[in-house]
Image (cartoon, rainbow, N blue to C red):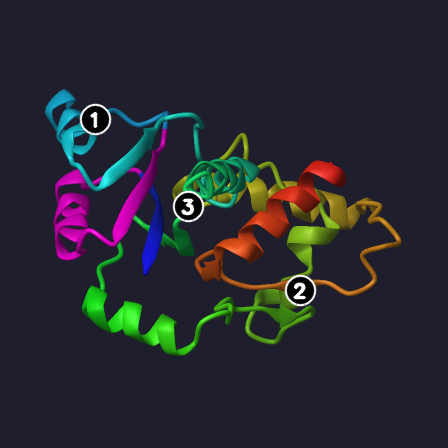
Amino acid sequence: MKQAILVTAYKNLDFLQKTIKVFNDDYTFYIHLDKKRKYKDAEIQALINNPKVKLLSLKYKVNWGSIDHLKAILYLASEAIKDQNIEYLHMITGQDFPIKSPEYISDFLTKNKGKEFISADKLPAKKWRNGGIDRIKYYSPYEIFNGRGYGRFPIKIFVLLQKLFGIKRKLPDSLSELYGGIVYWTLTSGAVKYVLEYLKSHP
């Protein structure tokens, strides 16, 4: 079973090479590196020369929680599904390492062929602060400030000011039910194609 592994990374490229090495030739890698980071030329060249790496991109500057992270994922997905032989796509980070062998993963997906693996909870969800609604109700400048590190403080202040002045985003009526989940998943190529086609027809 041919599979694509989509990776968004920003550091430890040597570790990423170790992850790639674990997988057999049934797996190909599509990698996006954060454009705002600096990398050693030798590390970049090593990834480009790796036969399992089909795409290495530095297209977007990615802050944690920003829409640019989503854009990077959608770009990788759109490139991966050009290979008609790919049946499943996996979305991971550059810090992930498999706890099962590639053969085990392939066997599991063969037995569960056609199933999608993605986490989603109806909002509000108890496991997130304020039910996870703040990220949707209020403007959060993740494109300007990184949500990890010191950047989270101006974001929090910006959201607090909106609450104080009664400012809220106007959501489309079509979004009557809202869901949230982690950004990492395993999906069939058919599901990924559906998402990309939907985005084209509903920009």
Which residues make up the magenta segment? 10-34
Residue 200 placement, left or right of 6: right
Give the residue at mark 1: 39
Q: Residue at x 15, y 47 (%)?
A: 15
Is 16 one of the magenta-colored residues? Answer: yes
Left or right of residue 87, residue 49 in this image: left
Instruction: Indicate the amino acid at tag 3.
Output: Arg
Q: Residue at x 14, y 56 (%)?
A: 22
Which label was assigned to residue 179? Answer: 2
Q: Is the residue under label 1 in contact with that under label 3 (CB below 8 Å)?
A: no
Asked if residue 93 lies left or right of residue 160, the reply is left
N-term-proximal mark, 1 vs 2: 1
- Residue 198 got which mark? none
The mark tally for this picture is 3
Query: Of label 3 and label 1, which has the lower sequence position?
Result: 1
Picture coordinates of residue 11, whole percent (x, y): 24, 39
Q: Amino acid at mark 2?
A: Tyr
* Pointer 2 local density, CA inside 10 Å: few below 14, some 14–19, many at least 20: some
Q: Is residue 187 above or below residue 107?
A: above
Label 1's element?
loop
Residue at image x 58%, y 68%? 120
Q: Is residue 3 above or below residue 82?
A: below
